[in-house]
Amino acid sequence: MSPTTALTADQAAARLHELTVIDVRTPGEYASGHLPGAHNIPLDHLDAALPALRTAADRGDLLLVCASGTRSAQACRRLADQGIAAATLTGGTTAWTRLGHDTDRPAGPRTPWAMDRQVRLAAGSLVLTGLIAGQRWTAARRLSAGVAGGLVFSALTNTCGMAKILAKLPHNRPTPTDLDATLAALSRSSISRPIPE
């Protein structure tokens, strides 16, 4: 694969048995549903995973995945700068699930929210707080205006500062043992992949 390769959800589904899938979302997003057999290496831990990713790429094709394709495309560019070829999933897990492809979810009573849902809750809460508090203290309305400005900037630049902040919360961070286990699995000579149906 060349560093600029992108696969659609249907193309990736047809080749899933031969791809090493790396999900670059936060652990909370990953737990909310990921491609079968995907390994979770959050984007901000990509540099630490370079040796394991190089080993995995030497054995086969890498597919990087996020919610929309934006972060995985960024990760592909970072890997390409290091001489590691990878493809991105066009439309991310959103396109994958919209087309009805299966996702894996960990068993348990509570699944963490996806990052976009966490951002909507945080932004909405801050705007509402600014408006309610602004009835008594006019200066509190600046909070709502600041969040609104941040959302506009986020849309124009296709970045999200609030998501970067929320990604630092404990439930969105990989535990060292989870990340170590993922890197060890990638470094082994054979990675278990789903069997095609």
Image (cartoon, grey):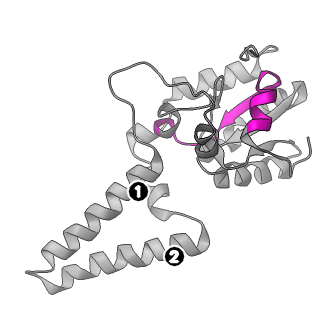
Mark closer to the chain start, 2 or 1: 1
Q: Quadrant of residue 172?
A: top left
Q: Residue at x 89, y 29 (%)?
A: 58
Q: Is residue 26 magenta?
A: yes
Outermost front residue = 99
- Across and down, in percent, residue 53 comes to 77, 33
Is 70 located above or below residue 83 in the figure?
below
Which residue is tagged 2? 153
Q: Nearer the viewer, residue 169 or 157?
A: 157
- Across and down, in percent, residue 120 comes to 38, 58
The Cα–Cα distance between marks 2 and 1, rounded to whole angstroms, is: 14 Å
> In the image, is 107 to the left or to the right of 100?
left
- Across and down, in percent, residue 144 comes to 29, 76
Q: Residue at x 47, y 22 (%)?
A: 106
Q: Hey, what amino acid is under mark 2? A: Phe
Label 2's element? helix
Q: Is residue 39 visible?
A: yes
- For label 1, the crowd category at 10 Å Cα-Cα, with few meaning under 14, some 14 to 19 and many 20 or more, is many
The mark found on residue 185 in the picture is: none
Image quadrant holding the N terminus, namely top right
Q: Is residue 54 visible?
A: no
Is 27 located above or below residue 126 in the figure?
above
Q: Is residue 29 magenta?
A: no
* Magenta stretch bounds: 10-28
Q: Hey, what amino acid is under mark 1? A: Val
Label 1's element? helix
Q: Residue at x 61, y 20 (%)?
A: 181
Q: Residue at x 27, y 82 (%)?
A: 142
> In the image, is 96 to the left or to the right of 131?
right
Which residue is tagged 1? 119
Q: Nearer the viewer, residue 189 or 69?
A: 69
